[in-house]
Image: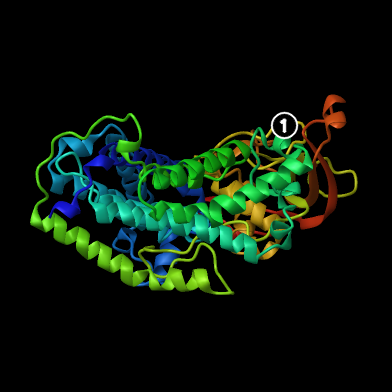
């Protein structure tokens, strides 16, 4: 079938696949480095406890068959190795069926992690990676030209990501319609980056231009992806530039880079001085049948996200099935005006009174020490730091895990401390730990020049009263009791 192939998108597919593989690599490395403290056998939300109460039909995962920290580490490391091989182009060295199996194995491994990851993996970019990853299985390798249907599925996904984000803003917080949300966003976003202070201090008229441009790129430009000729490439370029702007202004894990990968898949080599497609054989009938079947499946499953886009009660970052296929996306339907942070402190004194000396724990990404410049971590994802941002908004977000986290600080749990930048009690664990809520704001230019640092903070109230190991003994893993 001549209509089936689109050789002019060979280079676009190559770039898309390498970027996607790089995102997979980061995601698996995050899992390797963080799982023991978060969801391991002795973690805050252990996988064995989850799989004991949630059946496999509700959370399909290899870990329903067997879980141990060793098995999880092996799966995550295998995923990292396979992703690194795909970054290097290993799929083009295999027959078509072998390349598809390689991409499929990567998807199965990450699905298995996400479906037992609980609140630590309840982010939109997890579903986006899984949906994108499954579509990549059917894009082929150098043996065949990119399939037209597969490329259209990628555009449909990109459209939902951008248009969904645009609609949730327009329907949500009034400040998006008055173009004033960016007066606050750079300061109150979950994890500011090293340039966020400077973005926050841009002139307010420029913030209004930023907001207006966001509406254009997310509500108008996505329709250009379905236009013929260079229009789709121009739309993809505008989306890419916007995503790179977001990369510079904050830390949003791999969301922006995945969106860039999707956008670059829409670039037609005929519109740019790009390499011509290598010679390829005609697509085997079984491959054509699989791509057509996938397209029909996505068409059926698209009913739910399409209905969500048209609904006045639009939901963002919603999966409608357990395989995270054809999801609803969106971000920042509301923007906070004030920034609050949970600050954890410990003491090694035997009793707590007004004169107790408290020492603060330091985190890698979330704001803490006022003089410390925010760091750039994305596309790497600091899951604990992100969840603490939600915890500062409302203690209900932290209910399932916060006390377990504090309990592990009280015993200097090695895996938990590995998630932190600074442990003020390296020799022996603290006798008490408490948490306080602070109001944070970026300093002004004059305050920064005066040496006051990047943040100014004032205490709001006690978040968690001082607790000891005895108070939280029931939350400690057996090895620390």
Q: Quadrant of residue 177?
A: bottom right
Q: In this view of the protein, which residue sits in the foreground, 236 or 378?
A: 236
Name the spot of residue 311 as percent of width and height, x first.
54, 74
Image coordinates of residue 106 in percent, x first then y, are 29, 48
* Residue at x 59%, y 36% (from the top left corner): 248
Q: Is residue 167 left or right of residue 277?
A: right
Q: How many badges with numbers are in the image?
A: 1
Q: Secondary structure at mark 1?
A: loop
Q: Which quadrant of the structure image shows residue 204? A: top right
Q: Using the image as rendered, state which of residue 316 and residue 265 is in the foreground.
A: 265
10 w.r.t. 53: above or below: above
In the rendered image, residue 417, in percent from the top left (x then y), is placed at 58, 41
Q: Which residue is mark 1?
A: 372
Outermost residue on the front side: it is: 229
Q: Is residue 168 visible?
A: yes
Nearest the viewer among 409 and 453 is 453
Dividing the image into 4 quarters, which one contains the C terminus?
Answer: bottom right
Viewer-nearest residue: 467 or 147: 147
The quarter of the picture where the N terminus appears is bottom left
**CA neighbours of label 1 inside 10 A, class few (<14), some (14 to 19), many (20+):** few
Q: Is residue 117 above or below residue 100?
A: below
Asked whether residue 431 is in view, the answer is no
């Amino acid at each position: 079938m001549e209509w089936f192939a689109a050789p002019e998108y060979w280079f676009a597919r190559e770039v898309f696949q390498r970027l996607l593989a790089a995102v997979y690599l980061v995601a698996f490395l995050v899992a390797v480095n963080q799982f023991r403290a978060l969801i391991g056998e002795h973690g805050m939300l252990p996988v064995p406890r989850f799989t004991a109460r949630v059946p496999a039909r509700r959370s399909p995962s290899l870990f329903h068959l067997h879980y141990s920290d060793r098995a999880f580490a092996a799966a995550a490391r295998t995923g990292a190795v396979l992703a690194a091989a795909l970054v290097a182009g290993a799929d083009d060295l295999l027959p078509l069926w072998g390349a598809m199996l390689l991409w499929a194995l990567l998807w199965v491994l990450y699905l298995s992690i996400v479906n037992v990851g609980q609140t630590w993996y309840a982010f939109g970019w997890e579903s986006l990676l899984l949906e994108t990853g499954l579509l990549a299985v059917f894009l082929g390798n150098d043996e065949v030209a990119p399939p037209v249907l597969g490329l259209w599925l990628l555009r449909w996904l990109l459209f939902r990501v951008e248009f969904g984000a645009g609609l949730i803003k327009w329907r949500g917080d009034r400040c998006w319609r008055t173009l004033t949300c960016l007066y606050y966003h750079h300061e109150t976003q979950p994890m500011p980056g090293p340039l966020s202070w400077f973005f926050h201090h841009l002139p307010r008229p420029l913030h209004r231009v930023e907001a207006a441009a966001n509406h254009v790129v997310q509500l108008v430009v996505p329709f250009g992806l379905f236009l013929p000729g260079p229009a789709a490439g121009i739309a993809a370029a505008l989306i890419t530039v916007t995503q790179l702007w977001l990369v510079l202004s904050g830390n949003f894990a791999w969301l922006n880079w995945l969106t860039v990968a999707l956008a670059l898949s829409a670039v037609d080599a005929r519109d740019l001085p790009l390499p011509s497609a290598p010679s390829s054989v005609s697509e085997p009938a079984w491959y054509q049948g699989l791509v057509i079947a996938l397209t029909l499946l996505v068409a059926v499953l698209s009913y739910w996200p399409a209905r969500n886009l048209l609904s006045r009660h639009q939901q963002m970052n919603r999966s409608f099935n357990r395989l995270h296929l054809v999801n609803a996306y969106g971000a920042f339907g509301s923007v906070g005006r004030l920034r609050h942070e949970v600050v954890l402190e410990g003491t090694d004194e035997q009793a707590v009174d007004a004169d107790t000396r408290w020492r603060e724990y330091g985190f890698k990404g979330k704001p803490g020490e006022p003089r410390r410049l925010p760091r750039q971590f994305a596309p790497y994802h600091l899951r604990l730091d992100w969840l603490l941002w939600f915890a500062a908004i409302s203690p209900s977000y932290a209910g399932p895990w916060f006390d377990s986290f504090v309990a592990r600080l009280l015993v200097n749990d090695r895996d938990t401390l590995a998630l932190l930048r600074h442990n003020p009690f390296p020799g022996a664990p603290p006798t008490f730990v408490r948490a306080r809520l602070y109001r944070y704001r970026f300093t002004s230019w004059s305050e920064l020049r005066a040496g006051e640092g990047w943040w100014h903070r004032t205490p709001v109230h006690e978040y968690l009263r001082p607790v000891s190991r005895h108070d939280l003994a029931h939350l400690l893993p057996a090895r620390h009791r």
